[in-house]
Image (cartoon, rainbow, N blue to C red):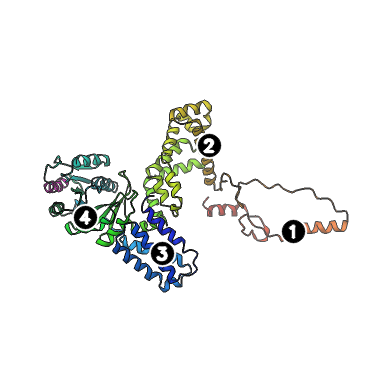
Amino acid sequence: MAQFGSLSDRLTETFRNLRSKGRLTPSDVDGTVREIRRALLDADVALEVVKAFTASVRERALSDEVNRALNPAQQVVQIVNEELVGILGGQQRRLEFAKKPPTVIMLAGLQGAGKTTLAGKLGKWLKKDGHTPMLVAADLQRPNAVQQLQVVGEQAGVHVFAPEPGNGVGDPVKVAKNAIKAAIDQQYDTVIVDTAGRLGVDAELMKQAANIRKAVDPDEVLFVIDAMIGQDAVNTARAFQEGVDFTGVVLSKLDGDARGGAALSVASVTGRPIMFASTGESLDDFEPFHPDRMASRILDLGDILSLIEQAQGAFDEEEARKVADKIATDNFTLNDFLQQMQQLRKAGSIKGMLGMLPGAKGMREALDNFDEREIVRTEAIIQSMTPQERELPKLLNGSRRLRIARGAGSTVTEVNALVNRFEQAAKMMKTVARGGVPQMPGMGPIPGMHGGKKQQQGGKKKSKVGNPAKRAALAAGASAAPQQAPQGSGLGLGGAKGGKAPTEEELASLQKFLGR
């Protein structure tokens, strides 16, 4: 995941050096704070933000709560995490909708920040949330800005209000006013106004944006800022705050190779919350901004909540239940396998989802080398099969596999590998569905679990003792041994009292308790 990549690496390495410390001394704290300061400055965080941040971390790290902690290193990580959440805005801020529709949202920012594309992303996100948004083409200065918004609106499935052709023709204030009337007449509950930008902050830009704000009286003014802008983010944000007085910030291009200091500076300097983040080129690469989750990503602590929300939005619960039934009854086919992969692709970037796992920065090289087109190639192989072959993979002989490989533009080896992986996966899922523990490739059976090879009963036949008295004593000891030995399961749990085996009723109640 590219978000705050270098900053996350530097901070993670700094905290790794603290793990061997049983107790933190003032010199250890000073050294850690010094490395944090360097990491933040290298990430283009504003100097005033860095000074306030490191001073607060140092003060808390030297307090009694850390000195009495069992693990001071973990306590320092927690302090840094809490301070990061603070400078990122603290609590998540949601959009405030008007009591009487339509809700007017105005976008402002420099040219090239991604306002037009973000208007389409926001419109699509609101449409998924049950709203009826309308995009307004009020950027009449930039060449082909109106046409771009119309294309983006068509891709997002959102209506675009564009009465003027643009390219320097038309009055943006008049367009914005008429858009509100059109939204009321056509019953759109949200209006997103895309305004013009400039290459730099100037008086003309601010005057036009202020006039549009005065004319439409928006409920939200979102300042769109490029995450790659660097140290100039603070000056730009302050200029727009004075000229337009925005209510929230949207970070664009957060997936790039930027060092991400803008995100850590803007919210702290302006006092305005970061509300959304654009994390890719697709219209679906758009998400609400959670300060606590972003701080966890920066510190490589993972973002499981966002991962769960992303998966829930892509996977159908009813369809998942049907697939589970098919797995349990040994009816899982390549058609079901294909459908599961397609749902996985709908959930978003595989790299992005893996990057949300805790410790994902340690797999950076593997994530960078991961080719998401492998899923597309797998889909092509399955789609090159006939319906009968997908239902019964055992029909795939050599000639059929050669035909499938030619149809998918792959090799027979790749087809063979896919079929083998499918058979192994289906076998493992079937074992899990029936309550067993699958045997992993390259690993032996797990101790105490069913599924391994049965131990051979008995061994070599022992020779008979010649002395009758000694033979009688050995026989008596062997018969007493089973009563003295504790009865237990393979998991190390005690057995039933008196050494009795459980009855069928007891086994049935136990299986019911376990949910099988």
Disc number placed over residue 220 in the picture, else none: 4
Q: Which of the two labelled residues, at mark 3 and mark 4, occupies the earlier sequence position?
A: 3
Q: Which of the two labelled residues, at mark 2 and mark 1, occupies the earlier sequence position?
A: 2
Question: Tag 1: residue type?
Answer: Ala
Q: Which of the two labelled residues, at mark 2 and mark 4, occupies the earlier sequence position?
A: 4
- Magenta-tinted stretch: 172-185
Q: Secondary structure at mark 3?
A: helix
Give x and y (percent) for residue 105.
21, 52
Question: Tag 4: residue type?
Answer: Glu
- Which quadrant of the figure has residue 282? top left
Mark-to-mark CA distance, 2 and 1: 48 Å
Q: Residue furthest bottom?
A: 64
Q: Secondary structure at mark 2?
A: helix
Pointer 2 residue: 420
Question: CB of mark 2 within 8 Å of CB of mark 3?
Answer: no
Q: Which of the two labelled residues, at mark 4 and mark 1, occupies the earlier sequence position?
A: 4
Mark in front: 2 vs 3: 3
Q: Which of the two labelled residues, at mark 2 and mark 3, occupies the earlier sequence position?
A: 3
Q: Is residue 171 left or right of residue 453?
A: left
